[in-house]
């Protein structure tokens, strides 16, 4: 089933979408962190996601978007905004997580999700937007660069 056959609507998440959000988040954890970061609890979305997503829908500092294809959630984006601090006075919006099911990739859906995130961030007065991606996930890094993000720092990690 492609986006061309069925319209995919990007919209704010509603309480009925929690199960779809958990499923997409679980797929993201399994596909991305689960293959790249052994320190991540890949069961987090199923254990803590329902409560976290439900709480985020009423939080004005959080954004929960879903990609809805005929009532089925085929992708999501979550974001948050934080006021500046004395050390970093800029208001910053963070793209916390994003996932698009494989059969809906490469058709512009991810770019639509990011565009809605950017519009939300601007509406809230954010001066910067940021996202974190695993350096070994070249596709994600390339995608975010194509959508206006640029590499600023690198996190180095050592197992102890």
Image: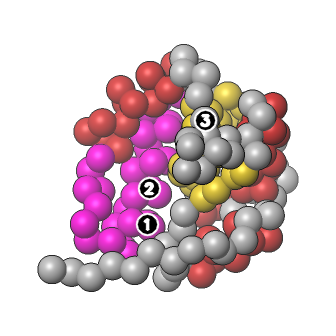
Give the side of residue 118 with respect to residue 44, left or right.
right
Residue 83 - label: 3
Query: Is 19 situated above or below 152?
Result: above
Q: Nearer the viewer, mark 2 or mark 3?
A: 3
Residue 31 - label: 1
Callout 1 touching callout 2 (CB < 8 Å): yes
Ranked by sequence position, the earlier of labels 1 and 3 is: 1
For the stretch drawn in magenta, the main secondary structure is helix
Residue 27 - label: 2
Image quadrant occupied by the N terminus = bottom right
Q: Quadrant of residue 116?
A: top right
Regarding residue 22, the answer to whether it shows in the image is yes
Q: Residue at x 39, y 31 (%)?
A: 52
Which stretch did the figure color magenta? 16-44
Ranked by sequence position, the earlier of labels 2 and 3 is: 2
Q: Residues within 10 Å of mark 2 (few under 14, many from 20)?
A: some
Mark 1 to mark 3: distance in Å?
32 Å
Q: Position of residue 10 (x, y in %)?
A: 74, 38
* Label 2: element kind: helix
Q: Residue at x 73, y 65 (%)?
A: 149
Magenta span contains residue 83 = no
Q: Residue at x 60, y 35 (%)?
A: 83
Q: Quadrant of residue 70?
A: top right
Query: Is 152 situated above or below 28?
Result: below
Q: Quadrant of residue 143?
A: bottom right
Query: Is 47 situated above or below 2?
Result: above
């Amino acid at each position: 089933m492609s986006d061309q056959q069925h319209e995919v609507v990007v919209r704010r998440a509603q309480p009925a979408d929690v199960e779809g959000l958990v499923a997409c988040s679980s797929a993201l954890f399994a596909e991305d962190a689960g293959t790249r970061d052994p320190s991540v609890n890949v069961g987090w979305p199923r254990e803590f996601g329902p409560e976290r997503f439900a709480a985020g829908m009423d939080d004005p500092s959080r954004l929960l978007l879903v990609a809805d294809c005929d009532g089925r959630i085929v992708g999501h984006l979550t974001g948050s905004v934080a006021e500046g601090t004395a050390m970093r006075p800029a208001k910053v919006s963070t793209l916390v997580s994003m996932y698009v099911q494989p059969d809906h990739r490469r058709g512009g859906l991810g770019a639509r999700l990011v565009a809605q995130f950017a519009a939300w961030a601007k509406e809230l007065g954010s001066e910067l937007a940021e996202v974190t991606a695993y350096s070994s996930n070249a596709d994600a890094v390339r995608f975010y660069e194509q959508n206006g993000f640029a590499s600023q720092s690198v996190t180095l990690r050592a197992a102890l």
